[in-house]
Amino acid sequence: MDQKRELSSIDLAALVTELNRYEGAKVDKAYLYDDDLLRLKLRDFDRGRVELMIEVGDVKRAHAADPDNVADAPGRPPNFAKMLRNRLSGADFAGVEQYEFDRILTFEFEREDQNTTLVAELFGQGNVAALDETGEVIGALSTVRLKSRTVAPGSQYEYPASRLNPLTVSRGGFDRHMRESDSDVVRTLATQLNLGGLYAEEVCTRAGVPKETPIEEATDDQLGALHDALSRLDERLRSGDVDPRVYEESVEGDGGDETDERDPRVVDVTPFPLAEHEGLPSVGFDTFNAAVDEYFYRLGNEETDEGEAPADAGASRPDFEEEIAKQERIIEQQLGAIEGFEEQAQAERERAELLYAHYDLVDEVLSTVREARENEVPWDEIAATLDAGAERGIPAAAAVVDVDGGEGTVTVELDEEGDGEGTVTVELDASEGVEVNADRLYREAKRVEEKKAGAKEAIESTREELEAVKERKAEWEEQQAADDGSGGDDGGEDDEEEYETDWLSRSSIPIRSPDDWFERFRWFRTSTGYLVIGGRNADQNEELVKKYMSKHDRFFHTQAHGGPVTILKASGPSESADPVDFSEETLREAAQFAVSYSSDWKDGRGAGDAYMVEPDQVSKTPESGEYIEKGSFVIRGDRTYFEDVPCRIAVGVQCEPITRAIGGPPSAIVDRAAAHITFEPGMYAQNDAAMMAYRNLKERFADQSFVRKVASADQLQEFLPPGGSDIVD
């Protein structure tokens, strides 16, 4: 069976209780190994040295480790480890919590001058973020900018959307979620109830319910037995009633007459014995933490033994490219943080100025609330009075959007431009006047500006490190050239070229992350190099036409309703464009892009029709008496049609000249991607198809961590059309 590489939500629930026993331990130092393994060295006054390990790469774990199982400290600490040392050295470990039923642990550290929160995301691509007392991200192993959430320096940390907790759901809620499924019992428990495959099967076994039972055939008694089994699991986890096990599996021999006597390999670790593993030998432990530590220590040793390979001629070459790419990534994150600080400071100043621009209105709100509080009017009555005033059309009352008695604040909504089109909310201290509240906002802007100055200093330090790496690379290459002499005409240059382009077999691929303006839209580059962009929603459709469509571009749309605005660009947004004679291949690829992301795909059609027009044929002005929806446009004049265009999309991993996930019509992706997968309309949901693609692509690369960083399932999903998909053989 496959070896476990990630802790489950149930595993984390069991670990949290044990990790909290180290509350009060002091942090000595932070270390970072290979960009994905964080080690915090702590001192516990009762237990001595404590090593807290958090890994978020291909292996995802969090536990206290036996010091004998910890590798020697790495060399010079990267900036993330330096930042943690500055903030955590001497801090007290104040506890850890699991975020709802997700694979997220939140570690709290307290120090007299500042508190710090570490959020370990043990799912998907994996991440560790450090937050200050306000929940603002100070630094993170990976910057995340998705439609659903952002994790970036200078921004407020955003948790993923909440998931149903199957261990605490009520009987009524459990029945409702189960009955809504059209699958069988075990698949519903695994996916809809978030249990995962192993524990879904375990619950079925403990409840005595056949796992293949279709939901429509499951009786109320069977659902009750399943709910009871879940409740018993929850009771054991809450009470700390664990009986940990590390499960093993014998290793088959390679054939021959003699018996293979290799040690068994570990395959799973669980907080209590599982009926599903009844046939496997296991080793018991006193604590689940000790079991998890032993499991991952042995897993790492087994993989090291199996992964040993003979040395080759290039093995001694330092991976300068990876180190250079790493420093460039850090600079990119720091630049993003500075940009965030600038935006935040500007926003605070604008709020302060708005208070003065609406001085009379804000003063009336604050005076009214302050007078009421002096007369001991309860906060809820103040809120009710303001609501009533708003209904009567009193401007000051209508501006109030929230009253928080616990914090003593009033939040007002102020007209930003004076035309009612844009508004800004400002939280006010109800006990102070307009000037004091404005001064507080100015001081906050100044504080953020100071953080920006610190970030600029950090960038200079990182740039110095980058230059030092480049100098070491140049010195190494110069020394190699001197050692090798002229080298002769032996074809070595061709061998080097072949090595550089054999991305799938390279043990380490340097990451060169792009930062292109069009990445928030749907996009691809045609096989002839032209950019094609499409809207993801009505707002983006409007934006593309109004802001990014130039006179020499081409506008594409599908005959079917519900397609994206698609623009074939003749140039970039800041470049002057000349008329372009686009090839038939380029036009056909843009049409295929438009069709594939339209309702043709979502409805399961294998092909569709699209048309093309000039930009001056696209208008937002309808005919008299007609109305057009947001994101829609009126097309006037003749159209060029593309009929029976196949619904096909390829997704892949690009390695040069930059590294990232790409997607679009197969003919445009195949030659650009080191590896790709082609999809057609089918049965697998968008997120499932993305996970299939990620696993398939990752298996093709020797450097699997590279795929995880540049082409995770979430990143690949951005290129898949809405609706079901199947892989094309």
Image (spheres, grey):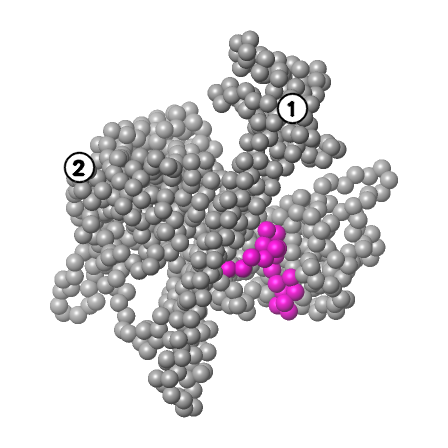
Which residue occupies the foreground of this view, 691 or 95?
95
Tag 1: amino acid = Val
Q: Residue at x 16, y 58 (%)?
A: 263
Residue 622, percent from left and from top: 82, 43
Residue wearing tag 2? 46
Q: Tell me the crowding category of disc 2: few under 14, some 14 to 19, or many 20 or more residues within 10 angstroms, Cα based.
A: few
- Residue toward you, 508 or 207: 508
State the extent of the magenta-drawn residues as a range: 513-531
Residue identifier under label 1? 362
Q: How many marks?
A: 2
239, above or below 324, in the image: above
Q: Which residue is rendered at x = 29% and y = 37% of the image?
A: 92
Amino acid marked by disc 2: Asp
> In the image, which disc is placed on residue 445?
none
Quarter where residue 485 is shown:
bottom left
Mark 2 or 1 closer to N-term? 2
Left or right: residue 518 versus residue 659 is: right
Residue 64 visible (yes or no): no
Q: Report the side of 69 relative to 412 (left or right).
A: left
Q: Is residue 302 covered in magenta?
A: no
Residue projecting furthest to the bottom: 488
The residue lying at 65 percent from left, 34 percent from top is: 353
C-alpha distance separating marks 2 and 1: 56 Å
| Corner quadrant of residue 18 | top left
Q: Nearer the viewer, residue 49 or 547?
A: 49
Residue 286 point in image, percent of width and height: 16, 39
